Image (cartoon, coloured by chain):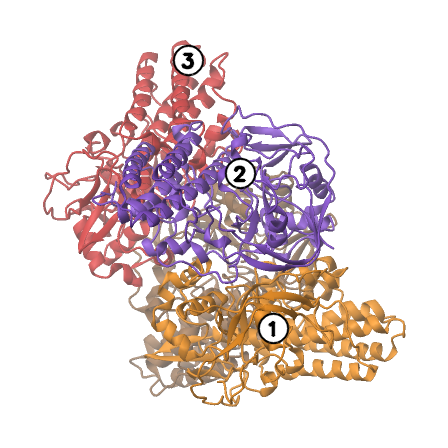
Chain colours: A purple, B orange, C brown, D red
Amino acid sequence: MGIIRDGSRQAEHSVRNLPNARATLAARYRSVRRQSETLCQPLEPDDYGLQAMPDVSPVRWHLAHTTWFFETFLLKAFLPGYRPFHPQFEHLFNSYYEQVGAPFPRPQRGLLSRPTTEEIFRYRAQVDEAMTALLASAEERLWPEVATRAVLGCQHEQQHQELLLTDIKYNFSINPLRPAYQADLPDTPAGHNTPLEWIEQPGGVQEIGHDGTGFGFDNESPRHRVLLASYALGSRLVTNGEYLEFIEADGYQRPEFWLADGWRVAREHGWQAPLYWEKTDGRWWLFTLAGMRTLNEHEPVCHVSFYEADACARWAGKRLPDEGEWETIAGHEPVHGNLREAGYLHPVPAAGDACPAQIFGDVWEWTRSAYAPYPGYRPAAGALGEYNGKFMVNQLVLRGGSCVTPADHIRASYRNFFYPADRWQFSGIRLADDR
Amino acid sequence: MGIIRDGSRQAEHSVRNLPNARATLAARYRSVRRQSETLCQPLEPDDYGLQAMPDVSPVRWHLAHTTWFFETFLLKAFLPGYRPFHPQFEHLFNSYYEQVGAPFPRPQRGLLSRPTTEEIFRYRAQVDEAMTALLASAEERLWPEVATRAVLGCQHEQQHQELLLTDIKYNFSINPLRPAYQADLPDTPAGHNTPLEWIEQPGGVQEIGHDGTGFGFDNESPRHRVLLASYALGSRLVTNGEYLEFIEADGYQRPEFWLADGWRVAREHGWQAPLYWEKTDGRWWLFTLAGMRTLNEHEPVCHVSFYEADACARWAGKRLPDEGEWETIAGHEPVHGNLREAGYLHPVPAAGDACPAQIFGDVWEWTRSAYAPYPGYRPAAGALGEYNGKFMVNQLVLRGGSCVTPADHIRASYRNFFYPADRWQFSGIRLADDR
Amino acid sequence: MGIIRDGSRQAEHSVRNLPNARATLAARYRSVRRQSETLCQPLEPDDYGLQAMPDVSPVRWHLAHTTWFFETFLLKAFLPGYRPFHPQFEHLFNSYYEQVGAPFPRPQRGLLSRPTTEEIFRYRAQVDEAMTALLASAEERLWPEVATRAVLGCQHEQQHQELLLTDIKYNFSINPLRPAYQADLPDTPAGHNTPLEWIEQPGGVQEIGHDGTGFGFDNESPRHRVLLASYALGSRLVTNGEYLEFIEADGYQRPEFWLADGWRVAREHGWQAPLYWEKTDGRWWLFTLAGMRTLNEHEPVCHVSFYEADACARWAGKRLPDEGEWETIAGHEPVHGNLREAGYLHPVPAAGDACPAQIFGDVWEWTRSAYAPYPGYRPAAGALGEYNGKFMVNQLVLRGGSCVTPADHIRASYRNFFYPADRWQFSGIRLADDR
Amino acid sequence: MGIIRDGSRQAEHSVRNLPNARATLAARYRSVRRQSETLCQPLEPDDYGLQAMPDVSPVRWHLAHTTWFFETFLLKAFLPGYRPFHPQFEHLFNSYYEQVGAPFPRPQRGLLSRPTTEEIFRYRAQVDEAMTALLASAEERLWPEVATRAVLGCQHEQQHQELLLTDIKYNFSINPLRPAYQADLPDTPAGHNTPLEWIEQPGGVQEIGHDGTGFGFDNESPRHRVLLASYALGSRLVTNGEYLEFIEADGYQRPEFWLADGWRVAREHGWQAPLYWEKTDGRWWLFTLAGMRTLNEHEPVCHVSFYEADACARWAGKRLPDEGEWETIAGHEPVHGNLREAGYLHPVPAAGDACPAQIFGDVWEWTRSAYAPYPGYRPAAGALGEYNGKFMVNQLVLRGGSCVTPADHIRASYRNFFYPADRWQFSGIRLADDR
């Protein structure tokens, strides 16, 4: 996810409804920044540099890159007399802004032991101090731009907080010792069999996109009308138990369920189950942020690629929703659910009688919508605009946030996006059907 | 393009408006089959086995695979007592139908010298004879299915005729001798400067998709309504001269015009101009089916990837159309233009005062629409249905046909599709803009 | 093998004992040249362009490259007024002489359909005519150099004749139809169990290297003394039956028999048997130039890499000989055996009571000697010298010729060389042991 | 180097002249083990996990693997009641002993953050304590084997000490900050122009190989006679200044100096100078363990591959020595020179009037001898024997030790070996010539 990601994301054009006081924004800034460091508490010094595949970044890099963002787009631009912490950090911690100089090659981030973690924490401290000064002292005429960028920087850092967790999970997963990020995470509820129901929606013109209330990335705008045919949306997420049926129906061996590109990728990588599933002595186990756990049938299936989600839907005689269908229904739902603050850091079974259930949190829901500009979308000017349009090809939209998404970071119009073969995010399946 | 392509295409659910007489269909069959062989006349025996990259197929393979289609889906299924020409051709000439047995690996097609070209022509002769018998003798109750499949087989073969030309062009291009497919192709008109105008289209609901008249592939259906914002479509294709301006404005060196994936691909391959462009002693040359020719500024630019088309549009301050926008305007145009029958086998400058110009023929026009199912689309059952849905990811839709597309094979609702990095098709650029 | 090979071979410094008459050399020239064309008689026009892996070359290329050698090093240099057949053949048919201009990339040789086979035969005819003129008319003062190069050109062409056969075998082997090069090759004798005996050789100083009689490549010189410890050499080649015991003793699964690099390569490629062995319904078959044949236990094992030869020897508690050991014994043997002229084009069981048996012909025998310069060896000057020293690293020496080596091309001092993972040559195993 | 290396090295069959007292061996053990930890003192916690290419290993891994050696081959085998530190370390820290279970994939060693460095130091402490107990208490009948293995373990650890330094140098070199391992290393002497002289050696039979005095790896045995032609050996190493002449004579652009495989590799990697050379503003700099330094013309050239060494020798009209030639002369020289204890950790200019100079220390000297078994060599039985013969293919022998080799680890008969493209060792050039 994210602005964050190279090979990723979006920014905002403009901050609507700016915080009405500098103090509020300063507090928000401090809180977000502190949260990143809190997430590092369970780690050993040895863990900060790990990068087990090109798609993930070391923890150390996340900590520095988010700081670089504030230094580059706020402090260098607006704080008189600000002296950068180190002349080469520009190059080392740029993610993909080609207009800010060639970024350091992403797959090699794990090969940098210097600056050390300790220096990076000092870098954070210097930037935090300077940001506090800037937020307190920026001239009134500059304030709108300063505030806009500061809010964006906080959102950006929150995206990286989610990535920090998805990345450390992947990095630990390839260690034969299967280390836990946090061995004492709370157990998830056992759950029970919740019947899948269908939320019926008649066809017609709907409005989707950011409604102007609060922060939104520019890829959520402009709000616009879409024409939908009649459809139905599944009341809850697809569970591990249901996905197991797909596996046991030889789903991974039957090409008729698969997109051609997905079939090829699944063959090449030998996929036989979602990422992090392991079968030991006839029993399925899942690698989690708390270490290995036995599979719970009632939990939502997680860590599936778009290809697997699509194949499973096809096997079930259904399909994935498109993003307009999803947002039309989600737009009426309150933002609550198993998000990061719930503390599980793992999807949990549907509970209660909410319908739809699990719209927010648990797992990002793959849609069949290619990630593309909304009608009338125009990228911003300058380097900050670079992450607007440039990722709008080859990726699919995911919606709803996950168990590692901060609650104050998600909303119905939020568009996440990944490549169809990606599996290391907390990504799962909600079914849809034509009517 | 095509059913043809592994890594491709679509079929039809149903043939609408079947030929009203068996004789008509038999004549159509003979004419299409003969045409494939006519296209081979300029070739030397040595040329039939060439495969210069995995995406292209040898001529020999095109000739056999199209024949295999009739043998597999018509003769084995419906002609009593039919004996297949060779037991292993099933495996050798299947393209991608996983349900008909594992296909022979595509990148190795050029490594088969047996069956020889001569045997393949005998294979064609046997199948043609049997098809003539089948079309004459099929029982009335089977006729609708026989006719449907025979029509589909002819359309399929026409798609391969286009590929045969695009592939032989690529295959010849890497030979330092730069051989001509047909050295005596007619010269294209010199052309002149035609101003680019904008066709204005107010927003609203439009209908797109196959209207039920004549043949259509199933990916064109169902016809359905789309909601468009106001837009404008360029009156003609982007020319070589205009594209040269993009090159000379350092278009290939400026990341701000490029999608991130495109920038990476262009770097990796060292793209500095469209495929087949060569600069010699300060002058641009193009490799064509008639050999090397100097660049004509008024011709439409051709052999650009989606990434280049998109970057060029961005540089121009415009964008590519989506397929609904394209079809809304093209749906009112007659199907004529520089198609294969014109005999140029190369795009030609816009002429006359038609507006829009060059809608059909010349070059396939990249849209920014991801190739995806239309609302309500359902793949057919069985192996013939395999090419319906399975390619609907990671590709972009192209519209309008090219100078190597048969005139009776194209229509406004026709959806071609390729990966965004593909350049060996006759693919070019029409601009669009928001209003 | 060969001068021939890019990634290969040797030439001669000087021809010793030149043919005493121009007529003799002209006759030799015609005979060798005719032989290349005779070898093509079983082929279909479709076969000439095949290149199924980078190590092999198309038949068409062998025919042209050997001709290029005469044109470049004889006709252009010595025949007044000679006009090259085509200006670009210099580039297209150079194999690896960097000093004669950059060669055309080897792995793409199969992608050239032009010049056609028919043109290449015309090229051969022109060069043959001009060579006849040159051999008849060269001035006396130039004759020694002309004769030296002409002899070298003939030896070079003979090396390519062997490659033409090894390459066509490989090219056909990957075709599921398993076509025969010559279906009516004579059956090989059934053979019988010949006990393996040991030829004992006391240690001491021996002489090896070319003795100055007749032609020799420069890598065979200078003749020099070597100091050998006592050893024993196997009286015959290792048979299929013996190699099968190695396989059935899990030889391919037991790392203790393998060199580390060999173990890695065998894992990567999934080797479980020599190249061209196929197990069908519990029975072993071999692909041969006559098509598929059942395995004959008494035949020498063939198409093994150095790694397999070495592992098999280790499993047997023996080792491979070094080249000094081999030549010391072979130097006393007459040059006869199952060479190309025997017509089998396949190894045959040992017969009779010769001891050692099978020294010449059947299979090239891997030695454990790294291919390196003899003491005092100096590469020749100029482009012809380029193939002298430049391959003397990373390869191992093979000795004795094979069933596809011309009889008048082999001798005891002949040093062939290939990489340790190469298997497509007719290469086998003779054991040695310390004493 | 080393036993150490996967893709490496040798062991000993037997320890000759065992330490005459347990105390001596125990002291030796403690000293070697302490030295490994001393080498880590300049490192930051962040540095221990770095692995910037597959050939190098993380510091953490070197510390654990050397410990694993003692645990596996001594403690588990001979210390009653020894409890392994962790059940999975067997798998994690095995380097390449296939018979001790499949090793953890080498290229992924840098992806393990657990066990942490702190745990690995605890692992070392436990093993050291147990080794002390074993060396004190081993029964007399077991002592010879215990002592043999303990000595081997110490030699093994010394090999890894050299690798630890070569690897950390490589790991730091790719960091744009160019961190120093030890910024305060002593400056190397400026040196001066020392003329290159030739040590003449008449041909004849010489003896090489380990003479039975002190420790030797089994690849140095048996001592045996070799027959040498007359030759001359350069009196000192090739200098940076001389190598610069080669560069400035377009040595990297002229194929006539290069082995074919070397030319290909140099093209592929874009080599234009030795590893760690950087040209900035027209001036050459070298990356060293003390950071960036300007090039000193009088220092021996270092970090060249065999291919570069061979090409430079050819350009100079000379050649590399073979190992018999080298050892024949070195066998008369005392073991002293710029070895690790000198503290430079960098090669230094020749000084004084010793002739030959720089035989030991400074840089490993490439020979043209393929790494192969000596006559009569037989690998040992069991897993400890696995590193004897299995690397004897595809590598070249280097002699003489380097500025990072412990002085008590090197001798005239010592055979180091690397692949011809390897450059990250301290490897350089001594010339030889025929006479």
Provide the chain ID for the residue under circle 2: C
Would you place residue B416 above or below residue A27 in this image? Answer: below
Task: Identify the mark at residue B327; answer none if there is no mark.
Answer: 1
Q: Is residue C423 visible?
A: yes
Q: Is residue C412 visible?
A: no
Provide the chain ID for the residue under circle 1: B
Q: Quadrant of residue D402?
A: top left
Q: Distance between the Cα atoms at labels 1 and 3?
A: 85 Å
For marks 1 and 2, give the one nearer the viewer. Answer: 1
Residue identifier under label 2: C257
Residue at position x 29%, y 20% in the image: D31
Residue at position x 51%, y 60% in the image: C335
Provide the chain ID for the residue under circle 3: D
Residue A435 position within the rendered picture, expressed as x and y whole percent measured from the top left: 74, 55
Would you place residue D107 above or below residue C134 in this image? Answer: above
Residue identifier under label 3: D134
Disc 1 and disc 3 on one polypeptide chain: no
Residue C180 position within the rendered picture, expressed as x and y whole percent measured from the top left: 66, 66
